[in-house]
Image (cartoon, rainbow, N blue to C red):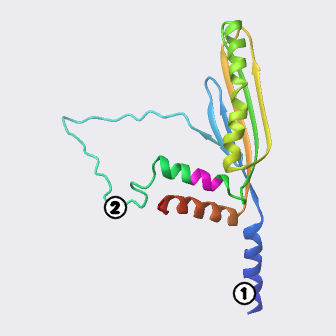
């Protein structure tokens, strides 16, 4: 009996200890990669070759099972979910590092786009701060004049515990299924 109580208490304590989820994204002219826990996932679409035999038409049969969220998510429920997540006290923390290196052929266009691109990081911070507690936010935009290329690197670490994940899932479900008077 004591072993069962000890195991339950250890699992209860582990539910509140946050663990890191490391995510990354790299986009260059020829490379597109997504990283989860430093495992590289290539996200380039692969082309499938389909052999056609004769004039046979294939029909895709759609699943007829009951969809739980069908007709439930619209603009009003999305606003309700975002409002609940914004007021959430148990937000997961986020460390975000964005690096953008870009260049255009014309130096004047590069300078104008640099001014426009420097308005984007506060918007990204505001959007991520509604869902996450953004503790570290770095955004570096580096223009390269008279060169045409783009390179985007996003590195992030999300610290979340099992209890916070369950609470956030409960808030989303509450936002979907509550009726507004």
Residue drawn at 69 percent across, 23 percent down: 117
Choose between 30 and 51: the one closer to the eye: 30
Residue drawn at 23 percent across, 36 percent down: 53
Mostly what secondary structure, the magenta segment?
helix
Residue assigned mark 1: 4
Outermost residue toward the front?
Answer: 181
Residue assigned mark 2: 65
| Res 88 → quadrant | bottom right
Q: Quadrant of the N terminus?
A: bottom right
Dot 1 or dot 2, earlier in sequence: 1
> Does the magenta segment cover residue 113?
no
Looking at the rendered structure, the secondary structure element under dot 1 is helix
Q: Position of residue 22 (x, y in %)?
A: 72, 48
Choose between 156 and 127: the one closer to the eye: 127
The correct choice, above or below, for 139 with respect to 176 in the image is above
Disc 1 + disc 2, Cβ < 8 Å = no
Q: Position of residue 108 (x, y in %)?
A: 70, 7
The answer to whether any part of residue 63 appears in the image is yes
The correct choice, above or below, for 80 with respect to 3 in the image is above
Residue drawn at 72 percent across, 55 percent down: 92
Number of numbered discs: 2
In space, the residues marked 1 and 2 are separated at their CA atoms by: 40 Å
Looking at the rendered structure, the secondary structure element under dot 2 is loop
Q: Which residues are magenta?
A: 81-85
The correct choice, above or below, for 111 with respect to 129 in the image is above
What numbered label is drawn on residue 106?
none
């Amino acid at each position: 009996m004591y072993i069962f109580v000890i195991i339950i208490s250890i699992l209860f304590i582990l539910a509140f200890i946050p663990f890191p989820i490391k995510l990354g994204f790299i986009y260059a002219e020829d490379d597109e990669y997504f990283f989860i826990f430093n495992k590289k996932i290539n996200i380039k679409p692969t082309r499938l070759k389909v052999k056609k035999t004769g004039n046979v038409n294939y029909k895709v049969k759609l699943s007829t099972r009951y969809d739980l969220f069908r007709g439930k998510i619209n603009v009003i429920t999305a606003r309700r979910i975002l409002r609940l997540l914004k007021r959430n006290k148990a937000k997961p923390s986020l460390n975000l590092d964005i690096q953008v290196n870009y260049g255009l052929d014309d130096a004047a266009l590069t300078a104008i786009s640099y001014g426009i691109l420097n308005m984007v990081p506060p918007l990204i911070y505001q959007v991520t701060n509604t869902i996450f507690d953004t503790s570290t936010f770095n955004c570096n935009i580096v223009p390269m004049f008279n060169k045409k290329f783009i390179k985007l690197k996003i590195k992030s670490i999300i610290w979340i515990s099992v209890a916070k994940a369950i609470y956030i899932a409960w808030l989303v479900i509450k936002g979907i299924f509550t009726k507004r008077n």
